[in-house]
Image (cartoon, rainbow, N blue to C red):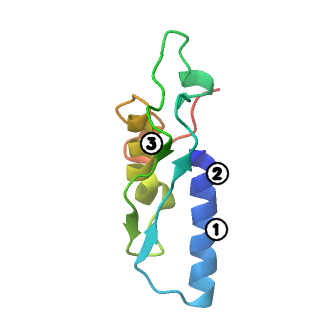
Amino acid sequence: MEQHTIGAVTQYQKFAQSIGVTPPLLIGITLSGVNGWKVVQGPYDFPDSDAVFDRDVVSPPEVIMSALESPADVVLRPLFDFIWNAGGWPGSPNYRDGRWAKPPS
């Protein structure tokens, strides 16, 4: 989800620049119908982990993009951290030195 969201926001930034949109922009993500779902899939899905969402709707506070040149992964990190935290993790494990990094396969 993170990689697709970062890609979509990056494309929106390019489009917004091309039509002259001026920041600030408010960006939000809401997940619904997730009560009991695990946050993780793939390399982080440890079999002994029972951490799941404990609510039906996960809606982090919006973030502000104050410049269209801002890296989307940096702007979105608080949203991703909130979502991972709601599922029992301290934050997104996909950030290295403040930037998003593709998880290992």
- Within 10 angstroms of label 1, few (less than 14), some, or many (20 or more) residues? few
Q: Are marks 3 and 2 in contact (CB under 8 Å)?
A: no
Give the x, y percent position of residue 58.
Answer: 46, 46
Q: Is residue 59 above or below residue 97?
A: below
Q: Is residue 94 above or below residue 27?
A: above
Query: Hey, what amino acid is under mark 3?
Result: Ile
Q: Nearer the viewer, residue 28 or 23?
A: 28
In the picture as drawn, the residue positioned furthest to the bottom comes out as 20
Give the x, y percent position of residue 70.
Answer: 44, 67
Q: How many marks?
A: 3
Instruction: Quarter of the image for the C terminus: give it.
Output: top right
Q: Are marks 1 and 2 in contact (CB under 8 Å)?
A: no
Instruction: Quarter of the image for the N terminus: give it.
Output: top right
The mark found on residue 83 in the picture is 3
Query: Hey, what amino acid is under mark 2?
Result: His
Circle nearer the viewer, 1 or 3: 3
Disc 3, SS = helix
Left or right: residue 2 compared with residue 76: right
Left or right: residue 10 compared with residue 55: right
Residue at left 62%, top 85%?
18
The mark found on residue 38 in the picture is none
**Which residue is the site of mark 2?**
4
Q: Nearer the viewer, residue 71 or 24?
A: 24
Mark 3 or 2, nearer chain start:
2
Mark 1 or 2, nearer chain start:
2
Query: Hey, what amino acid is under mark 1?
Result: Gln
In the picture as drawn, the residue positioned furthest to the top comes out as 48
Residue at left 50%, top 56%?
29
Circle nearer the viewer, 3 or 2: 3
Give the x, y percent position of residue 103.
Answer: 57, 33
**Which residue is the site of mark 1?**
11
